[in-house]
Image (tube, rainbow, N blue to C red):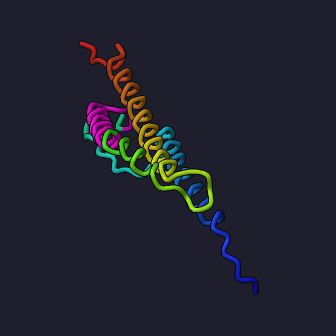
Amino acid sequence: MIDVNIIWVSETARLLFVWGVALGAIAVSLSDLHFRVDLRLAGRDDPLAPGWWDAVLQVMAIAALGFVLIHAAPTIAKAGMQMFASLPLDYGVMRLAIVVGLAGMLGAHVWRLVEILVSLWRPSSFPRG
């Protein structure tokens, strides 16, 4: 058996894993296929159509992601002081993946909120009377 410890393999795997999770979180948020609990109000004509409660949930997700993003972005510079052992990169690259993932998820939730508000304010969605 060969007793060789190749450092760049574990560092590259760690870096690719973190970036893969960040990009996967963006893809899941954009496709709206993530796990969630749907609360539907009884008595609605179309229980699957987005309502005001869906807009409130999107605003709450945007607020939470924005809060974490604002506090996560400054950590990139702090982590940039420590270099990887064998890769010509610093740990700020891994922190950047987290910030990019949060920003992408935030953008996806803003986009979904706009879609919900447009569907709620269409003339066909107002009650006729």
How many numbered marks are there? 0
Say if the magenta span includes residue 65: yes
Q: Residue at x 27, y 18 (%)?
A: 127
The one of 111 and 115 positioned closer to us in this rendering = 111
Give above or below for 9 relative to 21.
below
Residue 60 occupies quadrant: top left
Q: Position of residue 40 (x, y in %)?
A: 29, 42
Q: Residue at x 38, y 41 (%)?
A: 73
Q: Residue furthest bottom?
A: 1
Give above or below for 79 relative to 100.
below
Q: Residue at x 37, y 47 (%)?
A: 75
Residue 99 occupies quadrant: top left
The main secondary structure of the magenta stretch is helix
Quadrant of the snapshot with the C terminus: top left
The one of 72 and 51 positioned closer to us in this rendering = 72
Q: Position of residue 22 (x, y in %)?
A: 50, 48
**Span of residues in magenta:** 48-69
Quadrant of the snapshot with the N terminus: bottom right
The one of 5 and 37 positioned closer to us in this rendering = 5
